[in-house]
Every structure is written in structure tokens, then in C-alpha cells.
Amino acid sequence: MKIIVSDSSPLIILSKCNKLYLLNNLFSEVFITQVVFDEISAKNDEAKNNLQTADFIKIISVQNMSVYKQLLDVLDSGEASAITLAKEQNLPLLIDEKKDRNSYKSTSTSLIVPPFSAI
């Protein structure tokens, strides 16, 4: 069973391109935090609708609030929660923003940067 943690940007981009299914082809589950879900759901658009119907995307709670709060000093809440969850679960992280990747380099889990990160 392949599982990955995702930040909001890759999910929004894939959803708007009608390619969210690609993640399901590669991973059995995609974990997101409630904060990431809320970021995607903030707009009532196609990304929100696609996310709500994707049964392979699961909302998982962040447990280590001290790591999360440390990351909030340099990142916004969505990225901080996604990085914290990936570290807690020891899972690869799908993220596209350079500052987030730099914050994540010190962890021991894998980092996956989508090819569309320059879009």
C-alpha cells in the first residue's frame, strides 16, 4: 500500500486539470490535514468538488503540535501541517513551493516535487 501526504497546491493544480485520478493511479491513499482541506475548500470551485468526491484522499490529524508551531514561524499553516504530518507518519510529501521544500530538507522522509511546480 503506497501512501503519500500532500499539500494543497498539487491537489488544486491536478484537480483543475481533471488529473486528480493520477494520484490514485500512483498511491492507494493520499493523506491531507484538515488545514489543507480547508484551504482547498475555501473556494467553491471544481477543485473543492473533486476533492470531496475523491475517496482515496483522507483527512488525518496532526499530533505533534510543537513541530507544527515551529514551522509556522516560516511557513503558512497548510504547508506547516502537511510537513508535520509527513514527518509524523514517515511518509513522502508532495509539495511544490520552494520555501517549503527548503524547510523540509532537514527531515528524513522523502520529498516529491511535481513536474508542474513551475506552472
Image: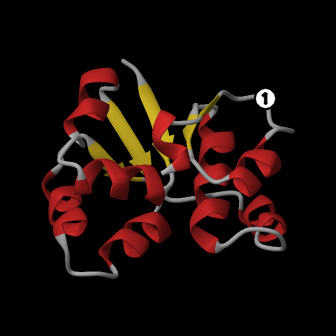
In the image, residue 40 lies at what x, y percent? Answer: 36, 69
Question: What amino acid type is highlighted by mark number 1?
Answer: Ser
Residue 45 left/right relative to 110: left
User: For the residue carrying disc 1, how many other residues have a C-alpha within 10 Å: few (<14), some (14-19), or many (20+)?
Assistant: few
Which structural element holds mark 1? loop
Would residue 26 be found to the left or right of residue 10 on screen?
left
Extreme residue toward the front, this view? 119
Q: Residue reaching furthest top?
A: 1
Q: Is residue 44 left or right of residue 70?
A: left
Instruction: Name the side, left or right, on which 28 lies relative to 37.
Output: left
In which image quadrant can residue 24 be found? top left
Residue shown at 57% from the left, 38% from the top: 93
* Residue at 26% from the left image edge and 31% from the top image edge: 22
Q: Give whichever of 103, 1 is nearer the camera.
A: 103
> Residue under circle 1?
108
Count of numbered badges drawn on the protein: 1
Residue at image location 72% in from the left, 65% down from the top: 65
Which of the colour schemes (rainbow, by chain, secondary structure, one colour) is used? secondary structure
Q: Where 48 falls versus 54 (above or below)?
A: below
* Residue 74 percent coordinates (x, y): 82, 69
Q: Quadrant location of residue 63?
A: bottom right
- In the rendering, at what x and y percent does residue 16 appear? 24, 57
Q: Quadrant of the N terminus?
A: top left
In this rendering, the answer to whether 21 lies above or below 53 is above
Determine whether 7 is above or below 41 in the image.
above
Which residue is found at the position 58% from the left and 48% from the top? 96
Locate residue 86: give its quadrant: top right
Of 89 and 117, which appears nearest the observer?
117
Q: Position of residue 46 (x, y in %)?
A: 17, 66
In the rendered image of this protein, does residue 83 appear above or below residue 93?
below
